[in-house]
Image: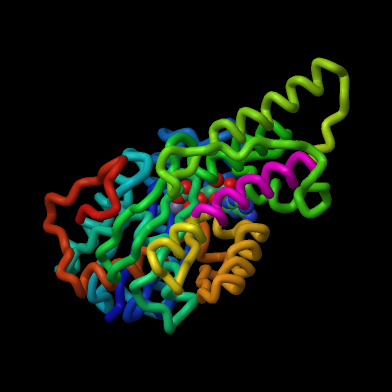
Amino acid sequence: MKILSIESSCDETAAAVVEDGRTVLSSVIATQIDEHKLYGGVVPEIASRRHCENITGVIKEALDKAGAQLSDMDAVAVTNAPGLIGALLVGVSFAKGLAMSAGLPLVPVHHIKGHIAANYITHKELEPPYLCLVVSGGHTHIVKVESYTELETVGKTVDDAAGEAFDKAARALGFPYPGGVYIDRAAKQGDPSKYKLPIPNTQNPYDFSFSGLKTAVINLIHNARQKGEEVDVNSLAACFQQTAVTMLKNKFIAAANDLGYKKIALAGGVAANSALRSALAQAADENGMSFYVPELSLCTDNAAMIGCQGYYEYLAGNTADMSLNAFATKKLHML
Ligand code: KG4
Ligand code: ZN
């Protein structure tokens, strides 16, 4: 079964052709990052307009690269939640038009379920159930993946998402948007014990909190500037990253142990972080767990992951009619 999938929830216009959920025949991404960089973050109206301009070309390229035409597809899958509403609406409207014109089933996909599904593309043997840590620009969740389509959140951030914290700390350190990858690189040259940063507590042991950590980085930089002292950017990046990774790892591994999971996975844009990948691989090893993480290119936003999840949603009968809408927020367990 071939699915044409579309992703437009934030600042990437993406389309892919995915066969039987796990084989990517093509995956095309038009990123808008360079334009949003000028403003230090995503400007929603600009994102919507760029999606509108790029979507036709991106979809055509995805079909061409797969050596296919719309008439060869068996369904159209599209991210319809959560994300920037004006951005999502471009993908959803386009997908509806395609599905209607070609008489194809329309499959709505939850963006976070898509991020988790990226693991199925990299690890052909992976099957639910397992426990997944989802860390993206907008989400930080510990999720029980009970089946391909039934997921339950057991912990989440009470304030900033992990990626948001990386991006805000990076901005304070003078790096461009999105700063997660710059922190990752700078940290490799720094001393992670040079500065002391707080690990915030939360009421629910599986919840996360990042705003105190982010503020501590910002305050440290301001205080140093006021005293005319130099900040060792690489070391502060290393300290921030180590603190964030330690919090994510400790809570996730504790949840996996408490809930009896021997299979754990990582997903979302921050899953590209080298320190987080190796910390979780090591912790899994120490705890006798098997660990799964998507290849780097599938961690950040792409449409291949939407085509993968779309396949399992289709098999579960979760298709939509032509009244499908987009939603800025949506709980993971809702269809
Ligand atoms: O999943 P994603 O592409 O978009 C959302 O759904 O939000 O995640 C983007 C986030 C950004 O915050 C970005 O800084 C972060 O992922 N990110 C990283 C790295 N690569 C991307 N954070 C830390 N280290 C990285 N190597
Ligand atoms: Zn994402």
What residue lies at 42% left-to-right and 51% top-to-bottom? 141
What residue lies at 30% left-to-right and 49% top-to-bottom? 81
Q: Is residue 256 above or below residue 73?
A: above
Relative to residue 152, is residue 204 drawn left or right?
right
Q: Is residue 260 above or below residue 234?
A: below
Q: Residue 315, how many percent across, how many down?
A: 20, 74
- Quadrant holding the C terminus: bottom left
Q: Residue 50, how many percent across, how many down?
A: 44, 44
Q: Is residue 15 visible?
A: no
Q: Residue 17, how many percent across, how many down?
A: 38, 72
Tell which residue pokes out farthest to the top in this image: 226
The secondary structure that most of the magenta stretch takes on is helix
Q: Is residue 249 visible?
A: yes
- Quadrant holding the N terminus: bottom left
Q: Is residue 250 magenta?
A: yes
Q: Residue 28, how many percent across, how many down?
A: 47, 64
What residue lies at 41% left-to-right and 33% top-to-bottom? 45
Q: Nearer the viewer, residue 176 or 119?
A: 119
What residue lies at 32% left-to-right and 52% top-to-bottom? 91
What span is colored magenta in the figure?
235-251
Residue 217, quarter of picture? top right
Relative to residue 184, is residue 122 drawn left or right?
left
Q: Nearer the viewer, residue 266 or 175?
A: 266
Q: Is residue 189 above or below residue 295?
A: above
Residue 229, quarter of picture? top right
